[in-house]
Image (cartoon, rainbow, N blue to C red):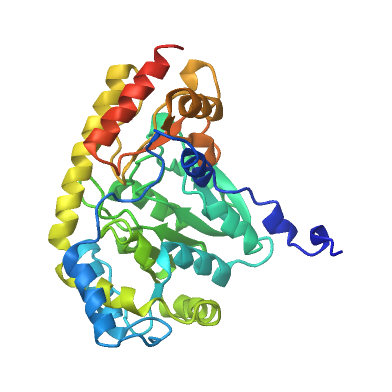
Amino acid sequence: MIDYSKVLSGTVVDTPKSGIRKFFDLMNTMQDVVGLTVGEPDFQTPWHIREAGIESLERGKTYYTANAGLSALREEINTYLTRKFNISYDPAKEIIVTVGGSEAIDIAFRAVIEAGDEVIVPTPSFVCYAPLVRMAGGVPVILETKFEDRFKIDPEALKAAITPRTKMLVLPYPNNPTGAIMTREELSEIAKILENTNILVLSDEIYAEMTYTGTHCSIASLEGMWERTIVASGFSKAYAMTGWRLGYLCAPAPLCEQMLKIHQYGIMSSPTTSQFAAIEALKNGDTDIQMMVEEYNRRRRYIYNGLRSIGIEAFEPEGAFYIFPKIGVYGMSGEEFCNRLLYEYKCAIVPGNAFGQGGDGFARISYAYSIKHITQALERIEAFVKTL
């Protein structure tokens, strides 16, 4: 008999499963559960985008594309980024179309991290960063952000986290799970710290279109930052294209050249049908984004005011589609609060510690759901809180 403990990677075995999926999977084993767990738009992919994908199939466009993606799509990505965020890339050498934003993040880490390199990861943040850093042989250095700072990076804390081994800073804004953003002025403070270093930035901008108090600023647009920034993004959130599994990364050519090797050997090319749909999304999807963001904004205000009326403290989220309320005041861990809410009142939210240090005592609530759904969840949360 084979001893699997002798053959499996210790790094992978020691990596915990996603706390987000844990509560989602639990919820699906129960009846009559109202869940606000998953960050997936409740909108269907707009019809004209689906139609472009269907047409590509009807025309027999089922072949591999270039490893980096269709040239027409890379050109549209550059056009989009230039007009929206004032950053520009050479479509032939500085853009790679990936299998979701997650692959973009993974190959960015693997292309630059060597054994023992340190990557600064602000938390609370999306669950993938620290595990992927470890799997690439790196060391995640946790930079805890705080509620009183609206979960933004504190420049002095960042300075203190930098060592001679620091290779990269992850910049996860707009932020999942907190709804925090970083303004141009705040990013400028980060840029000053990084100038005259060889520290790279991985800027995860998947929620860039969902900024409610102004326009998203990419750190790559700041003076001196383009050359050290890898931008990772995709189509899942802005265009409600989660199942199409399509993302992209943009970076200076010397970085892209190496990341493309990993993509070539591991993936070959991203789904062809999805790429044709994405061209249509970028060309004609602005009104779809506007409609969806307006609705998210309405839900954002509704859930914020609803939690406040219950007596639960949270800051009003400025980006993405999550709110991160304080629940530690009820004398239990976030895990216990969320477990009891699920089993006793059949309402599922995600404990904040699923998103790293600084998350305990909080919970992530997604408002990528209808007002009716959110209302039902708020009623159950209120009923539970009244018993505490």
Q: Residue at x 26, y 53 (%)?
A: 216
- Which one is in front, 246 or 106? 246
Q: Is residue 281 above or below residue 267?
A: above
Q: Residue at x 48, y 22 (%)?
A: 344
Left or right of 80 on screen, residue 350: right
Q: Is residue 47 above or below residue 16?
A: below
Q: Position of residue 386 (x, y in %)?
A: 39, 12
Q: Residue at x 16, y 46 (%)?
A: 294
Q: Position of residue 149 (x, y in %)?
A: 39, 33
Q: Is residue 33 above or below residue 48?
A: above
Q: Residue at x 27, y 25 (%)?
A: 306
- Whether residue 71 is visible to the viewer of this picture, yes or no, is yes
- Which one is in front, 309 or 170? 309
Residue ranking furthest to the right: 1
Instruction: Place residue 38 in its image quadrant.
Output: top left
Left or right of 50 on screen, residue 2: right
Instruction: Place residue 326 in its image quadrant.
Output: top left
Q: Position of residue 9 (x, y in %)?
A: 73, 62
- Which one is in front, 128 or 257? 128
Residue ranking furthest to the front: 31
Instruction: Place residue 7 in its image quadrant.
Output: bottom right
Q: Position of residue 170 (x, y in %)?
A: 48, 55
In the picture, the quarter occupied by the N terminus is: bottom right
Residue ranking furthest to the left: 287
How many numbered discs?
A: 0
- Whether residue 164 is visible to the viewer of this picture, yes or no, is no
Residue ranking furthest to the top: 387
